[in-house]
Image: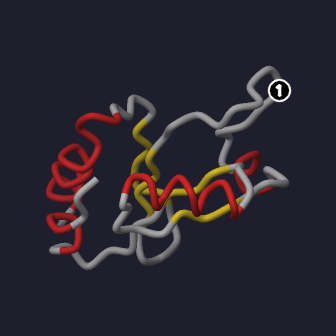
Amino acid sequence: MNGKAIREFNVAYFTASVDTPEVNKKFAESLQADYPVLSDPDKKVAEAYGVVHPGREVAERWTFYIGKDGKILYVDRQVKAQSAAEDVVSKLKELSP
């Protein structure tokens, strides 16, 4: 993902994974990721956001748009890895005042 277009908005962005920090570090390096990869190996945050649930041990690939007030503005449950950056930019434009 090329975050240059995303950085044009006043937002923080990152990805979260239920893998260990070591696995995530290797993954981020392999992609040359230009965004942080957070680790949640105990799955507490993933469960709180509903991306890991009974019958689903692997996290759903969802994008959460959260306002500066901490409220969730939108959840994209149809994330496509190939167009994720472009899709995020499009949604940020839509959500911008």
Query: Neighbour class for label 1 at 10 Å: few (<14), some, many (≥20)?
Result: few
Q: x%, y% of residue 75?
A: 44, 44
Left or right: residue 10 compared with residue 54: left
Q: Amino acid at mark 1?
A: Pro
Left or right: residue 94 compared with residue 57: left
Q: x%, y% of residue 53?
A: 77, 32
Which residue appears at 80% of the width and 20% of the height?
55
Where does the C terminus fall, quadrant-wise? bottom left
Which sits in the foreground, 1 or 52? Answer: 1
Q: How is the image coloured?
A: secondary structure
Which residue appears at 40% of the width and 48% of the height?
74
Asked if 66 appears above or below 56 in the picture, the reply is below
Which sits in the foreground, 48 or 39? Answer: 39
Q: Quadrant of residue 41?
A: bottom right
Secondary-structure class at tag 1: loop
Q: How many marks?
A: 1
Which sits in the foreground, 52 or 36? Answer: 36
Which residue appears at 47% of the width and 76% of the height?
69
Q: Quadrant of residue 39?
A: bottom right
Residue at far top of view: 55
Q: x%, y% of residue 58?
A: 69, 32
The residue singled out by tag 1 in the image is 54
Which residue appears at 69% of the width and 62% of the height?
22
Left or right: residue 38 compared with residue 75: right
Asked if 10 appears above or below 49 in the picture, the reply is below
Left or right: residue 6 compared with residue 76: left
Q: x%, y% of residue 35?
A: 40, 68
